[in-house]
Amino acid sequence: MTTANILRRTPKQQHQDPDKSVLEDDTELETDIDNKILAVARRIFRGDEKTVEDWLQTPNRALDNVPPFYFVGTKAGIDRVAQVLIDIAYGVCN
């Protein structure tokens, strides 16, 4: 599964078969916001897609032990994930 698809999955979809289509509409796999979050994550994790995928799916203390991908559905959630990535970049949290 691609990193972009992780961001597009709902919590319920996260537990479904990863080989099934994630999107009902195949028009665009990544939104501008997804691209920005992914770009920042890739930069912080030095382009390591596996690390980015793992980080997006792993419960995070800074996000109340919820995986970051749960938050990308809203502007406030995206801002929160972006702040955690910034904190990681500056060594504030992991």
Image (cartoon, rainbow, N blue to C red):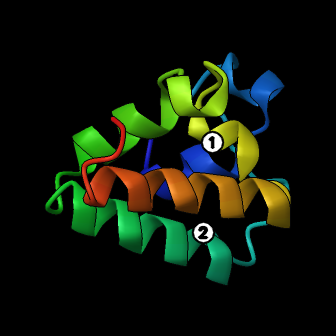
- Tell me the crowding category of disc 2: few under 14, some 14 to 19, or many 20 or more residues within 10 angstroms, Cα based: some
Helix, strand or loop at mark 2: helix
Helix, strand or loop at mark 1: helix
In this rendering, the answer to whether 42 lies above or below 56 is below
Q: Position of residue 6 (x, y in %)?
A: 56, 44
Q: Nearer the viewer, residue 87 or 4?
A: 87
Q: Name the residue type under label 2.
A: Asp
**Left or right placement of residue 89 versus residue 37 in this view:** left
- Tell me the crowding category of disc 1: few under 14, some 14 to 19, or many 20 or more residues within 10 angstroms, Cα based: many
Task: State the mark number for residue 20.
Answer: none
Name the residue at 65% across, 24% down.
66
> In which quadrant of the rendered image does the C terminus lie?
top left
Name the residue at 82% across, 60% down.
76
In this rendering, the answer to whether 76 lies above or below 48 is below
**Left or right placement of residue 39 versus residue 35 in this view:** left
Name the residue at 72% across, 37% down.
70
- Which residue is identified by label 2? 34
Residue at the bottom extreme of this rendering: 32
Q: Position of residue 42 (x, y in %)?
A: 29, 63
* Whether residue 31 can be seen here: no
Name the residue at 36% across, 38% down.
93
Q: Name the residue type under label 1.
A: Phe
Residue at the front extreme of this rendering: 92
Q: Position of residue 44 (x, y in %)?
A: 25, 61
| Contact (Cβ within 8 Å) of mark 1 with mark 2 | no
Q: Nearer the viewer, residue 37 or 53?
A: 37
* Whether residue 15 can be seen here: yes
Q: Nearer the viewer, residue 10 or 92?
A: 92
Spatial CA span between label 1 and label 2: 10 Å
**Left or right placement of residue 23 versus residue 41 in this view:** right
- Which residue is identified by label 1? 69
